Image: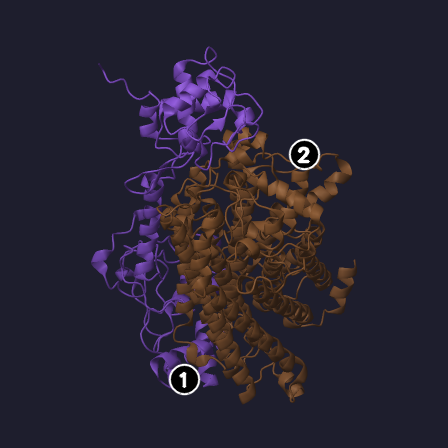
Chain colours: A brown, B purple
Amino acid sequence: MTADVSHDNQVAESPAASSQSIARYHLWASLVFLIVGVSLLALASVQFVSPDLLKGSGWLSYGRLRPAAIHFLLYGWLTIGLIGAMYYAVPRLTGERLTDPLVAKISFGFLAVGYAFGGIGILAGSSEGVRYLEAPPAADLLVLVGLAGMAHSIARTIARRNDRERSPAEWFILASVLWLVGLHFIGNLNMLTVLATVFYSQPPALHGINTAVLAAFYRAGIIGLWGATAGAGIVYFLAPRLVGLARFKPTRMSVVGFWGLGIAWVFTGSAELTYTAVPDWLETIGIMFSMALLLPVATIVVDVLGSLKGQRSEVAAKDRYSLNLLYVGLALFAALPVLNLTSALRASGGIVGFTDWVYGVELVAILGAFSAWLFAYVFHVAPPMVTPDALRVQRWHGWLTVVGLAAAGFAMLIGGMVSGLTWAGGDAAGVVAAGDGFESTADAMWNFGFAIVRMVGLMVFAAGQALLLSYAATAWFVADDRASVLAIDPDLDAAGQDVNAELAVDPATTPSGLRVGTIALAAGIGAFFMVVMLPSFEADAATPTLLADDSRIYPENSDTAIGRDIYIREGCMFCHTQSVGPIVTDLGLGPVSEPGDYAHESPVLLGVARMGPDLSHLAARGGTLVDHLKDPRADRPWSTMPSYDYLSNADLEALLAYVNGLK
Amino acid sequence: MDEHLNQVSEETGVPADLLERAARARAQSQGVAVDALVAGWAGGEAPTSAPAAPAEAAPAEVPAAPTEPPPADVASDAPASGGAGKLPEALLRRSAAAKAKREGRPLDEVLVEMGLSPEGATGEAPAEAPARAPAPAAETPPAAGDQPPEEEPEPEPQPVFAGFPRWLAAAFIVIPMVALLYAGFAPNGPDCGTSGQLAINPVSGEAESCDGGGSPFFSLGQSVYEAQCVSCHSADGSGGVGPAFTGGAVLNTFAACSDHVNWVTIGSNNWPDPTYGDTGKPVLGTGVAMPGYEGNLSAEEIASVALYERVAFGGGDPIEEEAACGLGEPTGG
């Protein structure tokens, strides 16, 4: 009812005005998250240069800093930012006022609070231990409410009119918001345990390796079905406007790109699990789709570049920088599937898997391609400032962003490759992926200066984003001629023509965008479920092995169970794996892991990367000691592990019992 | 310019603002003045030119081979088929379709009125006529008025990869093939279905297998181990009540497999010496007895379990160890 009232009050509003304030809220919130996120990420990168700098603080321990930083960047900055851009875009694309703006505003509150709460929860030690899904269940519930309201507003606005040709931007936006809700729901099924415990004594939960498969598909989904799809929607919205066109018409390439993206990306998820204890066929599916992903991404990039061809001279002075950012984003977007494929193929993935490369690819996606598009959006919608000072700030932002990103990305991708090669080549000289042998990895990674380059790169990048914030603040709040600047309606192109004017409409040739979006949603989610559920039909995945029954079982309140919780809380899995693969880099770690080994665990802590050695069968290699956890550099001067002297002795003993009991 | 625009707009049914935009883009791409271009349009060059006679109608287009060079310009408007000074025909046709639907008139009538050839007859003679196959009879256009407008056939079927650069169209064929070939032929990782130790090919240095080379004795040894030994030595050989095998321990203690087999056969209680193994370990050093399996297990089972422990946990070479434990292929003598 309240929504209806506000609807009536705004009858006189133009479509663009209907979402102006809501888009603004998202923009400012996302900028704040961006600054927080890049600062935390830069701070985390200090760990590898000066490991004891942040000693003594649990909140700033690397295992919490890194996931919190990525949480703030992926959700706070990218997701809220992309949603804000959609609120800006959708009324302009459809010529319709935003549906239920009040719902949208309330949803914004839920999203901002939910994501902030989630990130702070990770820092405070409430992590759930699954990469990209670390936020505590209560935060996930808040976010779910927010996403549902957001999807309602955006999808209903797009769906309201069916009798005209849709811009490709609308398909991408509609599909991505629906996919986001689905993804969030499936990825965070355990948030339902918060509710379920009220009704059932035993909350339903996935167990074993299937939780790892589910999480891997979620990660591919949040990057591909959400980040890339929503980003492409913003590109298809922004690109024509930057060159003074109302919209791109749907081309055959945009249709192929849309469907290809929706179908291929999520299935690349299982490639992340290559050489871990999942069935080979599941890995192969991931690898095949990682190859296929080259196609839709190339198609979208070629389509947008082709549509922009010959139009560049039409671009207004205030939008030149936005257009350049758009191109930077497209270039990084084109690189993404290539980087993905390198980690997916067995030959190269065996080298770069579990190294810093994994984080490098994440950086290129989250802070590279998608962020560049959002930057383009911010500079486009900011009240135009074409003074020399403003142009200088734009130029500086561009250089700091690109140089910082290039340095950090180079250090992580190449550094990762170097450590992978060190492990692969180390079999003659003895085990290098474990124990003291890990020193050679540390040498390769850190003595070549990769850690320093990455740290400096991320700091430069962070400085660039501080400039962005100051630019936006100046544009909106400080600029001298603000009144006259605001009088320029961003919806009018250089010629003073309303860029929202309807193009010639040919309903007969246009498939209903709503139908397209719904089918795509159904296909994506259905396929997602199938692939996630299929492994559970493999007897191997669910049947505990001897090893699982013998040692990987954690009765409630046992020492090892408490230790495992601490392991999760402190984010140990961001640097340590628990997975022995049938591969030369893992020689000497112990018996190769198999699916049933993890049958009693939820979540499965396979790990992300080996900044430190794999911990499977640690006891067989001598185990570890409380002293090492408290002061890692006393016995291993090359170690970059944080000092855990902020943990109580009881906690340390429990953690020790857990890691020394790992088989 | 505006009056010219309006004139063209009335003649073609295309909104004036759209025309202006098209004119600007075209003028820019051709480097001519916008006014001159619009005047040219209004002068009747394109819209009022004589329609192509239906009698000359070229066969309806069928999808041409994807190798046909795609238009270089995939810009926002539909591909322009006309030359300089002419509105894109596709655009006019779309407007006609919209107009026909709006006014409930047959499309062909509107097309003729707008100076275009009726549907099904392309306005221009095909440039590469030999490349086109004759249309099937079913696709010939119905007589005007026979068909309600809703059932108008979709306009101009296009090549599958219309608008795609040639390299991308090729990639759409090559990459799925590569992916399928990869799935079919690329080696998977070694099959580690059972808890096995990674085996490395000593020549190539590649990971080859993780079940000791598929020896039947290895599998036998594994099942015996899991039934008899796990409780004291643990599933991964890292020890428990009994000593660990991993980290080279088992091969240090028993350099020769025969010693290993002896120890498992006799056990600690009937062991003749105070120490055992090459490292001189005290017989009851752990305080817990090692059972002797003579009588419980066959000689082959005992040798197999030794083989399993030496290969899976000690990292011994499966082939050498098989021979050393007295298993291996019968020599035929």
Determine contact: label 2, label 1, CB under 8 Å: no
**Mark 2 surroundings within 10 Å by alpha-carbon count, few (fewer than 14), some (14 through 19), many (20 or more):** few
- Secondary structure, mark 1, is helix
Q: Is residue B156 visible?
A: yes
Please give the chain letter of the residue carrying mark 2: A
Q: Which quarter of the figure is the C terminus of chain B placed in?
A: top left
The residue singled out by tag 1 in the image is: B34
Above or below, A13 relative to B100: below
Please give the chain letter of the residue carrying mark 1: B
The residue singled out by tag 2 in the image is: A555
Residue displayed at 25% across by 52% down: B133
Q: Is residue A292 visible?
A: no
Q: Which quarter of the figure is the N terminus of chain B placed in?
A: bottom left
Rendered image quadrant of residue B87: bottom left
At which x and y percent is residue A18?
A: 68, 69
**Mark 1 surroundings within 10 Å by alpha-carbon count, few (fewer than 14), some (14 through 19), many (20 or more):** many
Mark 2 or 1: in front is: 2
Task: Identify which residue, A409 or A513, lies in the foreground.
Answer: A409
Amino acid at dot 1: Val
Left/right placement of residue A329 relative to residue A125 reads left
At which x and y percent is residue A442?
A: 46, 57
**Which residue occupies the extreme front position in the image?**
B274
Left/right placement of residue A243 relative to residue A384 reads left
At which x and y percent is residue A411?
A: 45, 64
Rendered image quadrant of residue B231: top right
Residue displayed at 50% across by 62% down: A363
